[in-house]
Image (cartoon, grey):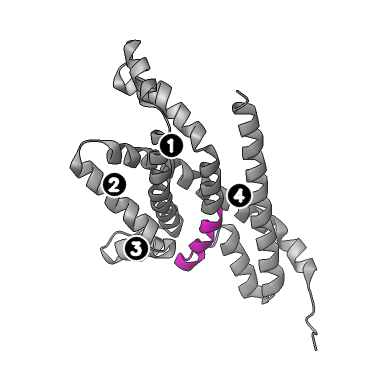
Amino acid sequence: MFKYSFHWRQVWQALPDMLWGALITLEIAALAMILGTIIGVLLALAKRSNNRAFGAAASVWVEIARNTPALFQIYMVYFGLGSLGVRIDSYWALLLGITFNNAGYLCETFRGGFKAIPETQTRAARSLGMSAGRAMWHVVLPQMFRVVFYALTNQMVWSILMTSLGVVVGLTTDLTGVTQELNVRTFRTFEYFFAAAVLYLVIAKLFTLSARLLAARLFRY
């Protein structure tokens, strides 16, 4: 017979700590997304270039990021580099691991976005006297980011959820880490992890809604 006793009062008392952990989660996800976007654009450009070395290096990065578990990538940063004498804090190990994973996925997203921009756009910009770099910065990149905007939104949600892997490398300040610490002290596993799951759901939905509202404002024409 089901006799579980729910202790939600402890969850309410711990809610400020969990909300602070949620802020750390958002911080890591946002930084990993920004860095992953920058690297992803560079990787996509490398794969589009005529330089075989750059293209091969970008392909290796993408293949590893997309075809190995994200958990292994975080392990390699934290434990792998640690075995070589490079000690990295669990916060930075998680951030670098998610950034590596994001860059690999975003590279292919951006490569598809670049293909969606007609070559005539670049030629028109060059005919107006723009250099190749200025044409890329002022003409191609803005249109490309518009094409891949919703894919970027999905990747950000994935980054938020991926921060939960930080607990395996000892991170205790993010939402999952705080929840695990509370669970260890009280053994109220169901209550705390249910509350954490709700917070992850709310964060993801709020971000998705915000992104849609932003898209409706930015892409009206």
Label 2: how many residues lie within 10 Å, few (<14), some (14-19) or many (20+)?
many
Identify the image quadrant of the C terminus: top right
- How would you rate the neighbour count of disc 3 (Cα within 10 Å): few for under 14, some for 14-19, many for 20 or more? some
Give the foreground label among 2 and 1: 1
Q: Amino acid at mark 3?
A: Met
Residue plotted at (43% across, 33% down) = 116
Q: Residue at x 37, y 60 (%)?
A: 67
Q: Which residue is mark 2?
A: 58
Compare residues 150 and 61 and report the one nearer the observer: 150
Q: Three-letter amino acid code at disc 2? A: Ala
Main SS, magenta residues: helix
Q: Identify the secondary structure beneath mark 1.
A: helix
Q: Which mark is residue 76?
A: 3
Disc number for residue 146: none
Find residue 23 and name its label. 4
Tell me the SS state at disc 4: helix
Say which of 174 and 44 sits in front.
44
Question: Percent from the top left, x then y, of residue 151?
Answer: 52, 44
Q: Are marks 2 and 3 in contact (CB under 8 Å)?
A: no
Indicate the quadrant where residue 4 lies.
bottom right
Residue to which mark 1 is pinned: 113
Marks 2 and 4 in Cβ contact (< 8 Å): no
